[in-house]
Amino acid sequence: MKVNTGKGYLPLIVVAAILSLSLVVNLPGLAVSPMLGTLKKVFPHSTQLEEQLLTMLPNLLIIPCLLLGGRISLSNHKIPVITCSLIIYAVSGIAYLFAESMTALIIISCALGVGAGLLIPFSTGLIADTFTGRYRMRQMGYQSAISNMTLVVATFVVGWLSKGDWHMPFLVYLIPLVPLAMTFFLKRIPKADLDDSAADAGSQPDSATAPRGVRTHDGLILSRVFACIGLYFFVTFCVIVLSYYAPYVAEKEHLSSEFTGTITSVFFLFVFLPGFFLSKIINVFKQSTMIVCIAMIFIGLAIFAAWPTSTGMMMGAVLMGLGYGTSQPMIYDKATFTTTDPRKATLVLSFILAGNYLAIVVAPFVIDFMRSLMHAENVRAFSFIFNCALSGLFLILAIIKRKSFIFRS
């Protein structure tokens, strides 16, 4: 069986190998967020910041390695880099099982971030290289759905495994063994798609044309690149609060650690679902799709902040997940229209993905700083209230600028 790419056909097993990379791109740090409470018991003298470093450090190391991976994508060494990054990722997952201190966990997290950072640009970049038009949008939706579905399963498994030995939840970091076993099939991707030096930019069907008077640099439409980075940074900044702070809100509400795992799984479940129905969602909301996504994030944060009970948190997680899950693949697709040279699709995706991981890294520092600045240490759901206010302002901006490249569908 073969799959239409818009430029030809690829064997289904090759497309499966490309999509298998999506299994691991969202796992660093986020998969273990439900077990932060457990680690507090294992290492009672650790601080909240040290525990959060386990989720932040992989993403911090991801950023420079992600940009390096994007630069490497301009060469013809894509498959070896993908293979090496998966090996680093898998070895780090194994090392977690033998760690006996918080310091060791943090060091291993750094190695995990290196492997993930090198890999992540190619999870979307290979799709941009091999697919075009509506076929690419469909695969971007699948890519987003698979990456987030992995988190749904991973967070559920982490919550279940955390009842036993505290090392067991880190077994989720062995998932890269699956795409590693499938890298052989990536060699069957046409050389013209993999080797940018062998492709002719002018012959590519998806070449973007820079609007008149808009500045470009080395084939990049700078205003669009920065707009995509800013949008991805902001929507991630707004929703990542759930991974960082939901466990502590739940604890104050005397909810179990199992519920924390459930709420995180529900969030990523609804991030996952829109990927399979992206075209239909866009057909319904048309040019207002991105605005609707931002509105759902705003409403979800508002419910979570105003009604931090099990029911309210569930409703908030559902709306935030739907908004984020729909906007994510749309941003990936918009990224391919930020360059006049399609051979640089992976490179520009690395820039835009860096905005996502930068948001993951800085969010707790910014939120904790604002909490201290406003003397709101005793406000139960301050992080959700603060992000709700930010998303409300961003929603107003999106409505005003609804006809701009970044906000229209």
Image (spheres, helix red, strand yellow):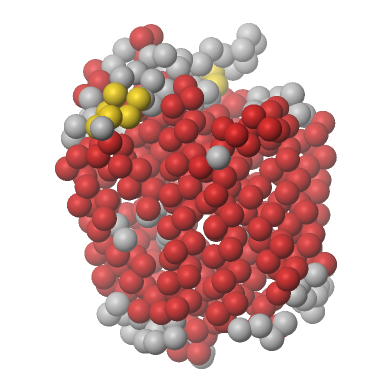
Residue in front for this viewpoint, 255 or 236: 255
Residue 28, relative to residue 143: is it above or below? below
Residue 62, relative to residue 377: is it above or below? above
Q: Residue at x 27, y 51 (%)?
A: 179
Q: Residue at x 23, y 52 (%)?
A: 180
- The total number of labels drawn is 0
Q: Whole-percent x and y of residue 237? A: 64, 53
Q: Residue at x 42, y 14 (%)?
A: 205
Residue 49, relative to residue 164: is it above or below? above
Q: Whole-percent x and y of residue 183? A: 21, 45
Quick check: can you spot residue 338? yes
Q: Residue at x 72, y 44 (%)?
A: 294
Q: Whole-percent x and y of residue 383? A: 72, 65
Relative side of 177 to 43, left or right: left
Q: Whole-percent x and y of residue 221? A: 55, 21
Residue in front for this viewpoint, 260 or 318: 318
Image-quadrant location for residue 304: bottom right
Relative side of 194 to 292, left or right: left
Residue 96, relative to residue 337: is it above or below? below
Image-quadrant location for residue 365: bottom right
Which of the image's four quarters has the C terminus? top right
Relative side of 196 to 63, left or right: left
Which of the image's four quarters has the N terminus? top left
Quick check: can you spot residue 121? no
Relative side of 340 to 252, left or right: left
